[in-house]
Amino acid sequence: MKTQKFISATTAAVASVLSVGAAETAPQRPNIVLFMVDDMGWQDTSVPFYKERTPLNERYRTPNMERLAAMGVKFTQAYACAISSPSRASLMTGMNQARHRVTNWTLEKDRKTDHPLPDVEIPDWNCNGIQPVDTINNTTYCTPFPEILRQNGYHTIHVGKAHFGAIDTPSADPLTMGFDVNIAGGPAGGPANGGYLGQNRYGHNPDGTPASKFATPGLEQYWGKDVFLTEALTLEALKELDKSHDSGKPFYLYMSHYAVHVPFVADNRFIDNYETLDGKESKYAALIEGMDKSLGDILDYLEKNKLADNTIVIFMSDNGGLDCEARGQMPDGAGTRCNFPLRSGKGSVYEGGVREPMMVYWNGVTKPGTSCDDYLIIEDFFPTILEMAGVNDYETVQKVDGKSFVPLLKGTADSAWNQRPLFWNTPQNWTNCVSPQEKRRLGLGQTCAVRQGDYKLVYWYTDGTRELFNVADDIAETRDLAAEMPEKVEELSRELGEFLRGCDAQRPSPKSGTQVGAPFPWPDGVK
C-alpha cells in the first residue's frame, strides 16, 4: 500500500528530516530520465499537440521528439507554472505554487526580482527558493524527491539548469537537493549573454572568473572550444550514465537544459536549416533542434546499451514559450504567431504561459504512438516519479499537493480525474517589457486561476475582474463567458478562494487609498 506522510518541520528537525521508507525490492527497478526543456512552448516542435498540425509544427525540426512520441504517449494538456522557478519548486516538492510561495524567478539572496509597480505592493514571496534546511528566510523547507530516490538506492544525476534557490543559499548547489552528481547546475535561471558558446567559456572571463551571475558553472574542459552548451551538457550526461551503468544501481537522470532560454544564440550546427526565418527566429529554431539532438543522443545511448526496455523517459517544459511581444516583435499573422493557437506566453496564466509539450515512454506500460487528453500539472511529477521507482513509503516535511498520474499511463484513471481542480497563483510582476494595455491582453499581471473540467477562471487581484473560458471549445481564450455563466463563475471562485486560503497563499495589496496595506480580496470576495 502506498503511503505518503507529511511531518512537521519541528518533528523533522528532531528526527533527521530525510527519513524514508524502503523501496520495493522487486528486481530491475526502472531507470528514469526526466528531460526538461527551459521556456519551450507547446507549439515549438514538429510533434502536433493540437488537434491538427499547424504552421509552427511545420517550422520546427524535432525528429527525436517525433521518435519519442512514436515510442510512448504524448499528453496534450500538461500544465506547469507560468515561470521557471515556481515550476521547478513544484516539481521538486510536489507542492502547488500557492503553497510553496516561490512565485517569481529567483537569483540573489533576499532580493525579489519583481519589477516595481506604482500602485501595487507585491507580497513578500519566497525569493530564496526551496531549501533542504529550515534555517533560511524567505524560502520553503522541503524534502526533495531526488533525495528520497537516493536514499532508496538510486544514483541521482543532475545535468544543466538547477535554479532551485538563490545565490549563497544551500540549494544553489544541487548536491544539497538529493543529487549524487551535479554537472553545470547552479542558482542562475539561464545562460549568460553569449554563454551558449564554448568559445566564450559559457560566460566566464579569460582568467576563469564568472563574467556575470549567469555564468554556467563547470564544463572547463570545453572552454575555448566550438562546443555548444547543449552539446557539452549531453556529452557529460552520457559519460555519467556510463559510470552509473557500471555501478549496478538504477539511475535517475535529470537532464535539465538551459535551452531554449534567452539569449537566443545561433547553434551553428543547425542554423542553416532556417534561412527563411528572420535572425531571432532562426536562432530560436536552431536552439530547439539542438535540444532535440540531445534527446536523440540519449535515446541512442539507451538503445545501444540495452537500457531502453528498463528506462522510463519523460519529456517536459517548465513554462510556456516567450510570446512574440516578449521576443521583441509583433505577431506576424494568426497562422505563425509564437504560441498560436494558445493565448500569450511565459509569465501568463493564459494557456500559452502554462500549457507544455509532454511525452512519456515506459516500456510495457505506455502504448506506442498514443495520445492522452487528460490534464495534469507539474506538482504531479513528484508522486508519479516515486511511484514509478517503486518507492511507496516515504516522509516529507511539506504537504504534497500533486497526484500521481501513473493511472493515466496505465489507462486505469477513473472519470473523476478531469474534474479535479488545477490551481495557479501569480501575484508577482514578472515584466514591464510591454505597455499596461498589452500586459492586460497578455495576462501579465497579478492573477490567480483555476481549471476544473472544461472551464478555467482567471481572477485579476487588482480590480476584481473575473474571466471565464471554456478551454475545450475555445483554446485561444478569446470568449469570456463570465457574464453568460455567473453560477459557474461563483462556483469556481469559491473553489479557488478556498484553496488559496487553505494554502495561506499570498496576495498583492494597494499602495494607496483607504485599503492601503490590506491585501486585495480573494476571488470569491472574501477579504
Image (tube, helix red, strand yellow):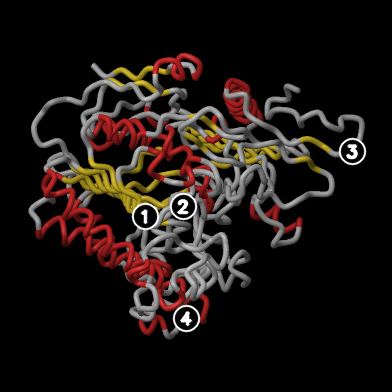
Badge 4: residue crowd in 10 Å (few <14, some 14–19, many ≥20): some
Mark 1 secondary-structure assignment: loop
The label on residue 183 is none
For residue 277, the mark is 4
Task: Identify the residue at image location x=58%, y=45%.
Answer: 349
Q: Which one is in front in this view, the residue at disc 3 or the one at disc 1?
A: 3
- Residue holding disc 2: 186
Nearest to the eye among marks 2 and 1: give it: 2
Name the image quarter holding residue 449. top right
Report the mark closest to the observer, 3 or 2.
Answer: 2
Q: For the residue labelled by badge 3, is the local secondary structure a helix, a strand or a loop?
A: loop
Of callouts 4 and 3, which one flags the residue occurring earlier in the amino acid sequence? 4
Residue beneath the point at 41% across and 29% down:
143
Q: Which residue is mark 3?
A: 512
Q: How far, Cα to Cα, is label 3 from label 1?
A: 45 Å
The picture places residue 261, in percent across and down from the top left corner, at 49, 62
Question: Which mark is first along the chain, 2 or 3?
Answer: 2
Q: CA distance from mark 4 to mark 1?
A: 23 Å
Crowdedness near tag 1: few (<14), some (14–19) or many (≥20) residues, C-alpha within 10 Å:
many
Q: Above or below — where is 134 with respect to 263?
A: above
> Is any atom of residue 51 visible in this view?
no
Which numbered disc flags the more N-terminal residue, 3 or 1?
1
- Mark 2 or mark 1: which comes first in sequence? 1
- Nearest to the eye among marks 4 and 1: give it: 4
Q: Amino acid at mark 2?
A: Gly
Q: What residue appears at the point 37 percent right and 52 percent down from the top-left corner?
A: 36
When the figure is inspected, residue 72 is found, relative to residue 394, above or below; the finding is below
Front in this rendered view, residue 36 or 160: 160
Spatial distance from mark 3 to mark 2, Cα to Cα? 39 Å
